[in-house]
Image (tube, coloured by chain):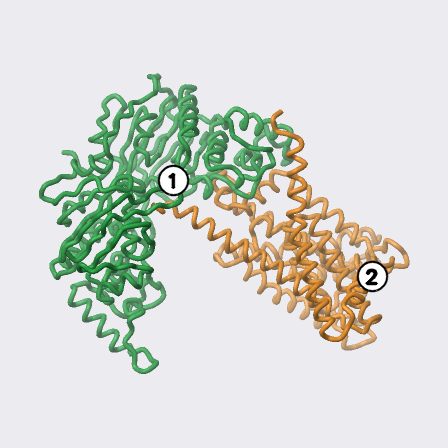
Chain colours: A orange, B green
Amino acid sequence: MEVKKINFIYYVQKNLIESVKLPFISITLGLIVGGIIIALSGGDPFAAIKGLIVGGFGSMHAITVTLTRATPIIFAGLSAALAWGSGYSSMGASGQMILGAFTAAITAVSISGPSIVIIIVSLSAGMLAGIIYSLIAAYISAKFEVYLLIVTLMMNYIADNIASYLTTYDFRDPLAVDRLAVQTQKIIDGTLPRIFPRYTLHYGFIIAIACTLLVLFMMKRTSFGYEAKMSGLNPRFADYGGIDSLKTMYLVLMISGALAGLGGACESLGTRFRYVDGMITSGGYAWSGIIASLMASNHPVGVFVSSVFLAGLTTGGGSIELRHGIPSEISDIIEGVLTMFVTAKLVVDFRFGRLRAQKEDGADVV
Amino acid sequence: MILEMKNIVKVYDRVVANKNVSITLEKGEILAIVGENGAGKSTLMKILYGLERPNSGEIYINGKKQVFRNPSDAMKQGIGMVQQHFMLFDTMTVTENIIYNNEISKGVFLDIDANRKKVRELSKRYMLEVDPDKLVKDCPVGVQQRIEILKILHQNADILIFDEPSSVLTPIEVDELLKTMKRLSNMGKSIILITHKLGEVMEVADRIVVMRDGEVVAEKRREETSIEELSYFMIGRQTTSPVIKDLEPCKEVLSVKNLSKVDESGKKLLGNINISVRGGEIVGIAGVSGNGQSELIKCITGLDTDYTGKIEVCGINVTNKGVGFIRKAGLAHIPEDRYYWGSAKEATIAENVLMGDENTERFSKKGLLNFREIRKHVYRIVENYGVKVSFLAQKMKELSGGNAQKLIVAREIEKKTPFLVACEPTRGIDVGAMEFIHEKLIEKRNNGGGILLISSELSEILKLSDRIYVIYEGRIEHEFTNKNLDSRKLGFLMLGGKTA
């Protein structure tokens, strides 16, 4: 064998370094900029950053809170990673999560039976809502030749308002102590159990791990994953090879919608035990998920790690506010800086990738 | 003499595009510059128009030396260019497009009426009819070209460069254009016409310069030359003799009947094409690129399903079917452009080799990829075709052009389909890799495969083909076998000459 083992190791190292390099630089720059802002506002940046890390990951309590928050971000991130990695720029995770969360919440209170059955049916219902909503966007985009990005983005507002309307008028909690609370009835049987009795972390996190592995397997080991990846890397190559691009698009967006819907469902069954108006959007889960997927260049395991990191940032932010009197917005600033660097990478890739492609297409140089 | 370009030399990376080229232009003259793709005529015009700067050489306008750093320098000296792809704003009116950059304004506002009047005036003076208030996107292509010409005249150009002006036009529009050019020259404008359509050249040009491989190889007055002679100068003498041995052709692997295609604007891209390829033969399609080859390939391979006529691959009717279906029927396809169509640069070598086979029984079971088989297959291909790679998970973009091409050729040949479409199989690669690919194509033919070979390198077609079709302006009207071949006549037909 001429193809040497040593080269393989070199490849793995190089690949690992390359995929870790960008998130690492982004995180470092984010922390530096955050530190500068803390220093400018009169705080001690080193104490604050240490506080952030300790607050996010420093104790069993911190870790479980972080992982609880990370759960919906992982789902949204996987959803985005699958779509973006296949070349379909869907921003629809937010809307799909909202409808998933809402559908699961009302399903769980309207059926009866053993909790395990209620859980499975409700989660499936949430997933189905995500699938349907994603497929509608896919259909509109394919049929009327409009950008998927715009369609999905706009449909997020529609989903939010639908859920808000239904929660306000048709499914409002009749037992709420606070008459102003816009929320559905509390789920009694059919909540996702906690992993450790004293902490908020629930089985949704286990489902998230399972989904990460499943997506990893699907992307790396199946012919569908191969076709999706090729469509993302060079759609013309995929067409040329005989891949049915329409079918691939619908399948990819279907699974992407399913993941987001399931993420929303886990959030209402595991954390809130009901649908509360605005619970998905105020958490910023979908957006964080997209950032996580950008940070990880659409690699499922990378999405998982980045999601946990982003969640930890938020948890830590809350903690430094309490302990160091530094506003928790500092973690938003760090996330903002991160987003900026990560999207800058996207823009650079896009611009230069296109320029390079144009140069090579322009065969008529001579 | 209104224009003189003296000893122009232009070198790109390693390619010499212009070797010491000199041309002159008189007032009111139509000068045609002809040559094959890559002969250096576009480069020369880019230099004249200020888009490129020469490595050495001078440009004189009315006897005064000029240096053009950009197109606006050239425009100031009265040089205008009608681009092959029009530079117009589609959603704006004809007037707005023509006056762009030279507006008449009232204070800070645009004086629309005065501008419109100006456009009417221009249009009347040069007898180029346009509706000043129409949107450009609502005008037919021929009118858009008129707008482009008016725009340049509005900038007071005295020297007009037309770059392949007829390539996007219908025959009637071409006639119109040729008349316009003659009229403009009679009004004292000087014209440079870049083209490889010799019929048009013989109709309008006063003088003809032939370029080949970056040099001027001939300069003739129209009266003293003919299409035959010009095509001979353009193509040169082809001495390559076929290297293939005789073989009894077997069953038909491709049959195309009455294939026609019209684009959105109504221009005929392909007209009534009838071709056939049998197992055990290589059939070449000779033609100057841009005469419908790309469109023909797209129809045959299923990348374009919008055409009329009938196509059969290996006896299966694949008319208007997509790529997947035709590939299953027995097609393999070496694409025109190895990076645009033929590969994903960011994907690994193995992933690039797998394309088209990801659902075959050999490499996948129930949707799961069989990596052992895939690795074995890729390894064998890399070994047998001498593709220089360091490891199988290497990215495609890290391969050199020749190696990437070899890999793509290997992928398509090793599918062992009865029919192969090979487009530009050796474009832009070194001689060694070229020879190797030629051998592999011949080997496939000798094993009974049928190959349709499309190449802009005439020598390649002559070397490999059993039979040759000539394509010109989307039509195939002539066929040669390698026994009765006359390369001079072939070149003549490729460039649009008519035989009685």
Quote the CA–CA distance across marks 2 and 1. Answer: 63 Å
In the picture of the structure, the residue carrying the numbered disc 1 is: B299
Q: Quadrant of residue A66?
A: bottom right
How far across and how far down the image is residue B121, in percent? Answer: 18, 71
How far across and how far down the image is residue B103, in percent? Answer: 29, 73
Q: Residue at x 20, y 64 (%)?
A: B129
Chain letter, disc 2 residue: A
Q: Which mark is residue A54?
A: 2
Dot 1 lies on which element? helix
Give the quadrant of the N terminus of chain B: bottom left
What residue occupies the far left of the structure in this picture?
Answer: B223
Q: Quadrant of residue A109?
A: bottom right
Q: Residue at x 52, y 47 (%)?
A: A246
Compare residues A27 and B313 and report the one nearer the observer.
A27
For the residue marked with disc 1, what is the amino acid?
Cys
How far across and how far down the image is residue A57, in percent? Answer: 82, 58
Dot 2 lies on which element? helix
Chain letter, disc 1 residue: B
How far across and how far down the image is residue A249, in percent? Answer: 56, 49
